[in-house]
Image (spheres, rainbow, N blue to C red):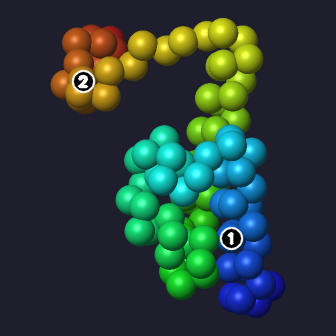
Amino acid sequence: MEKEEKLEIQIKRLKKIREDLGMNRTEFSRYVDIPLRTLEEWEAGRRQMPDYVLRLLTYYTKVERLLAEQKIELNIQPEIKVFESEHFNKASKER
């Protein structure tokens, strides 16, 4: 697959993810915590996003949708550092 063809596929997939969520670029950039300018550059084809980003966005949005459908709410606090938490330290000691 040529680089240009790969870029077009990425652009279409990214836009589809955003549009399936019913979000504009600003809302989507806030939702996934990606700078708006970066998102605009990706969608315009001026920059190519790393492949793993598209995979992670796909996974993230699918999981979010599934959790919402099942009415499951995760109370994850981003300010808590996983590697400094009691749970991580306890799990590391048990290994």
Answer left or right for 50 relative to 67: left
Give 35 or 27, whichever is nearer the viewer: 27
User: The N terminus appears in which quarter of the rendering?
Assistant: bottom right
Residue 6 to residue 71: above or below = below
Q: Position of residue 66 (x, y in %)?
A: 71, 24
- Residue lying at 39% horizontally and 19% vertically, measured from the top left: 76
Crowding near the residue tagged with mark 2, few <14, some 14–19, many ≥20 C-alpha atoms within 10 Å: few
Q: Position of residue 5 (x, y in %)?
A: 77, 84
User: The C terminus appears in which quarter of the rendering?
Assistant: top left
Q: Mark 1 = which residue?
A: 11
Mark yes or no: residue 44 visible: yes
Q: Position of residue 8 (x, y in %)?
A: 74, 78
Provide the secondary structure element on which disc 1 rests. Answer: helix
Answer left or right for 40 relative to 1: left
Q: Quadrant of residue 90?
A: top left
Residue 91 to residue 41: above or below = above
- Residue lying at 65% horizontally and 19% vertically, measured from the top left: 67
Name which residue type carries label 1: Ile
Q: Quadrant of residue 36?
A: bottom left
- Residue lying at 68% horizontally and 79% vertically, measured from the top left: 7
Q: Position of residue 47 (x, y in %)?
A: 51, 80
Picture disc at residue 36:
none
Provide the secondary structure element on which disc 2 rests. Answer: loop
Q: Mark 2 = which residue?
A: 80
Answer left or right for 10 relative to 93: right
- Between disc 2 and disc 1, whose residue precedes? 1
